[in-house]
Image (tube, helix red, strand yellow):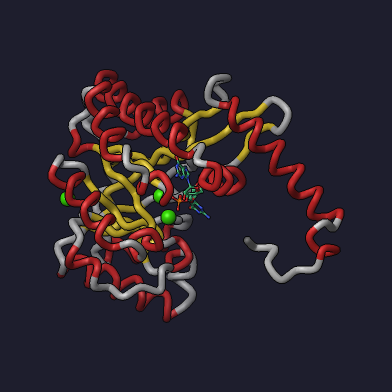
Amino acid sequence: AKSKGKSAYERFSPEMKEVSHERLQLESRMRRALELNEFELYFQPIIQTATGTLTGAEALLRWNNPSMGMVMPDKFIPLAEETGLIIPIGEWVLEQACAAAVRWQQATGLALGISVNVSPRQFRDPGFVDAVLRALRNTGLDPRRLELEITERLILDNTIETSDILSRLDEEGVRLSVDDFGTGYSALSYLKSYPFDTLKIDKSFVRDVMREQEDASLVKAIINMAHSLGLKVIAEGVEEEDQTHFLKAHGCDYSQGYFYSRPAPEEEFAVWLKTNRR
Ligand code: C2E
Ligand code: CA
Ligand code: CA
Ligand code: CA
């Protein structure tokens, strides 16, 4: 559909052929990645800002491919979305993430939360709610310890369906967060009609919070607004100590970012868990 209005020359330019060859190769490799066990979850701690206590982790997907090395999600999630492969991949992520949270509890006694990213195609799949419930059932994780991260962009379209899915998950006790909050040029009204628990302030606002007055004002305003609506707030992309002081002073509930830890493979996260638990 994108080629509408383009000349034949443009449509079949060598560059485009190359791009589509690359895409096809990526797609066929991705089709086999699940069975070849090439996906891996990394985990990044989520910290209670006021106390520095670990409260949970976000699961972030990595793809280890023998010929491409480690592929980051920005490189393959969009294609996984387009092809629908995100559905089986997303089910794998849900199950693995819940299983990891159960293992950590067995190893340390800590009932940490686990946050899982959900992409639009996955969310709209008719089997999505069942897939979530299946992952919980198969692993025995308490639904209240699973938080699904849904981007603000996704929430903005397709209201009736969205509202129905969110309510069903909420009724099951699953936590819901708005990811990339502030980037969706949204009307804020959805916040009062949907059962969200948490807002994640996008890292683009957090990055310059100590240098740009506007960013500082926005972050403060988001925290206050969220609290007055009964929502918790997570700041993502926290890289500097100064930022932690700012966030603490302004009552931001949770923080996440390289300052505390980069996303790490499970073994590394488990070591971090043992040394940083309180
Ligand atoms: P996101 O959900 O906004 O995840 C946060 C991204 O910020 C992660 O990138 C993380 O590694 C990075 N990050 C964490 N702390 C810092 C920091 O202090 N500074 C900076 N500059 N960045 C930080 P990552 O792992 O490359 O993931 C990129 C995006 O891919 C995610 O953005 C999410 O939208 C998507 N994604 C990752 N895993 C999954 C998954 O399992 N399923 C789906 N559907 N999407 C996923
Ligand atoms: Ca996220
Ligand atoms: Ca809820
Ligand atoms: Ca985000």
Question: Where does residue 174 sit, x and y in percent of width and height?
Answer: 20, 42
Please name whichever residue, 246 or 233, is drawn nearer the observer in this view of the structure. 233
Residue at 32 percent across and 24 percent down: it is 99
Please give left or right for residue 186 compared with residue 109 in the image: right
Question: Where does residue 94 sit, x and y in percent of width and height?
Answer: 36, 33
**Is residue 274 in view from this perspective?**
no
* 16 relative to 39, above or below: below
Quarter of the picture containing the C terminus is top left
Residue at 26 percent across and 21 percent down: it is 138
Please give left or right for residue 212 compared with residue 56 in the image: right
**Is residue 130 in view from this perspective?**
yes
Please name whichever residue, 11 or 14, is drawn nearer the observer in this view of the structure. 11
Residue at 24 percent across and 49 percent down: it is 165
Please give left or right for residue 139 compared with residue 239 in the image: left
Quarter of the picture containing the N terminus is bottom right
Please name whichever residue, 11 or 113, is drawn nearer the observer in this view of the structure. 11
Question: Where does residue 161 sit, x and y in percent of width and height?
Answer: 27, 55
Question: Where does residue 33 sit, x and y in percent of width and height?
Answer: 58, 26
Number of callouts: 0
Residue at 36 percent across and 75 percent down: it is 218
* 157 relative to 54, above or below: below
